[in-house]
Image: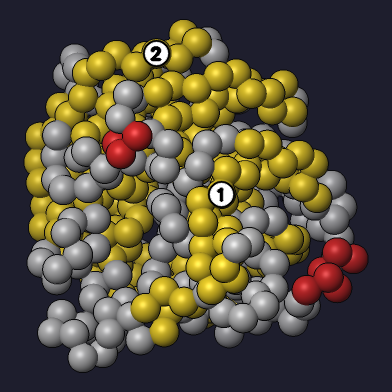
Amino acid sequence: MIRMLMRGTALAALTLPFLTAANAQIAVSANDNKIALVDGVNTVPANPPPDTVTILDIGVSPPKVLGELQAPSSVVGVPQSVAVSKDESFALVTSAMKVDPADPKKTTPDDRLSVIDLKASPPIVTATLQAGPGVTGVSINPAGTLAITANRNEGTLSLFTISGKTLTPAGKIDFGNKASGPSHVAFLPDGKSALVTRDGDHRVSILSIDGTKVEDTKKYMVGGFRPYSLVVSPKGDVAVFGNQGGGQGDSDQINVVDLKTNPPRVVDAISVGQTPEGVSMSPDGSHVAVILHNGATRPKNHPAYIDHGLMRIFKVDGTKLTQVTATKIGTWAQGSVWSTDGKTIVVQATHEKELQVFSFDGKEAKLTGSIKTNGGGVGMRTSMQ
C-alpha cells in the first residue's frame, strides 16, 4: 500500500522532480476537508483544515505521489471539477461550496477557480479567479486557448481565454433559467462544439464554438433524470453521461450520445444502479468506467443502504456499451482516471480519504493498492480525460 506521509504546510517544501519526466502522466486530485459523511448525513466538521490538491504520476506502476498543495475544492458538484492542460503545465480546480462565514456548521455557494502551475517547484496557485456561484465542472478546449466552467447555482457558464498559463475572464453564457443547474461542460475533439449537462432541468445543451467565441445553439437533448457527469470519446463519435436520479434508492441510468448525428442525439439508456456520480473513458475510447455511490452514502438503517460503492466498466463499440466487469470501491466515491495504456484506473474513495488503484486487463479490475490523501478526493482529471 502506498501512503503519503506529509501533511499540512510541511508540504510546501516538497519539490516535483518527476513532472518533467518523459514517461510521466500527471493526474490531479482535488480534496475536500470541510465536509464529512456521518451516517449518511453531510456534516461540516469543526475547524476544518484547508482543502488540498494532490498531484500524481499514474504513468508508473504503482502510481507515485509527486506533491500536494492547498487550494479550495468541494464535494458538491461533478468529479470533473479539475482540468489539466494538454501539456500538463497547469491545472484548474473549482470550488462550488465554502464554509458559511455566518454559520460555520453550514456551507454556502463559492465561485472560486484556482490556477495551479504544475511546473513550479513546488507547485503553486498562481491565480484565483471568480466564475459563478456553485462553480463545478471545468474543461479546457483542445487548442488550449479557452476554458469553460459550469456554475450550478447561477444557471450560467463562465468563459476564460488562455494565454500560456494565464486565464482572462471572457464573459458568460446565461441559460435563462437560474435553476437549470449546469453541471459539466465537455468539448468535442474538434473544439467546434461542446455539451453541457444541466441537472436542474434535465437537459444536455449543445454549444457552438468558433475560436474563443461560444454560443448556446438552443438545441438540447433529454436523457435521464438530472444529467450530471459527462465524458466525450477522443474519437469524437460518442459521449456518455450519468444521471443523478431522484435519490430514492431506485436504479439510475447512464445515457449514450451519438455525436455523428447532427444535432447529436441520445441513442441508449443503461440502468447501472444507485447514483452514478462520475464517468470516465480510457484514453483510446475503448472503455468507460462508471462510479456509483451504490447506496453507500445512505444512513445504515435506510432500506437502500449498501456498505460499499461500485465501479462498472463498459466496453465501447460505436454507440453500444457492454458491461465487462463490476467491482467494489470505497464509500462516497467521486472521480476516476485512466492511465495512458488503459491498464490502471485510480478511483477517489472520498469517505476513506484515499485514492484506490485498480489494475485492468480488459476483463477484470483488481484493487492493487491505495494512496492516502489529505482530504476526501472530490474531483480528478488528467490531460486526456
| Foreground residue among 167 and 328 | 167
- Left or right, 251 with respect to 107, comes to left
Within-10-Å neighbours for mark 1: few <14, some 14–19, many 20+: many
User: Which residue lies under the disc numbered 2?
Assistant: 215
> In the rendered structure, which amino acid carries the disc numbered 2?
Glu
Disc 2 and disc 1 in contact, CB within 8 angstroms: no
Along the viewing direction, whichever of 80 and 103 lies nearer the viewer: 103
Q: Is residue 244 above or below residue 14?
A: above
Give the residue at x 68% y 36%: 129
Counting residues from the start of the chain, the first of labels 2 and 1 encountered is 1
Residue beneath the point at 47% across and 46% down: 134
Position of residue 336 in the picture relative to residue 296 (left or right):
right
Q: State the mark number for residue 259.
A: none
Near mark 2 (Cα within 10 A), the count class, few <14, some 14-19 or many ≥20, is some
Q: In the picture, residue 64 is in which quadrant?
A: bottom right
Q: Mark 2 against mark 1, which lies toward the viewer? A: 1
Is residue 54 visible in this depiction of the protein? no
Residue drawn at x 33%, y 80% as measured from the top left: 40
Give the x, y percent position of residue 219. Answer: 22, 18
Element at label 1: strand
- In this view, which residue lies farthest toward the right? 13
Amino acid under disc 1 = Asp
Q: Residue furthest bottom?
A: 301
| Numbered mark located on residue 110 in the image | 1
Tell me where residue 43 appears, x and y as whole percent: 46, 77
Residue 105 drawn above or below residue 148: below
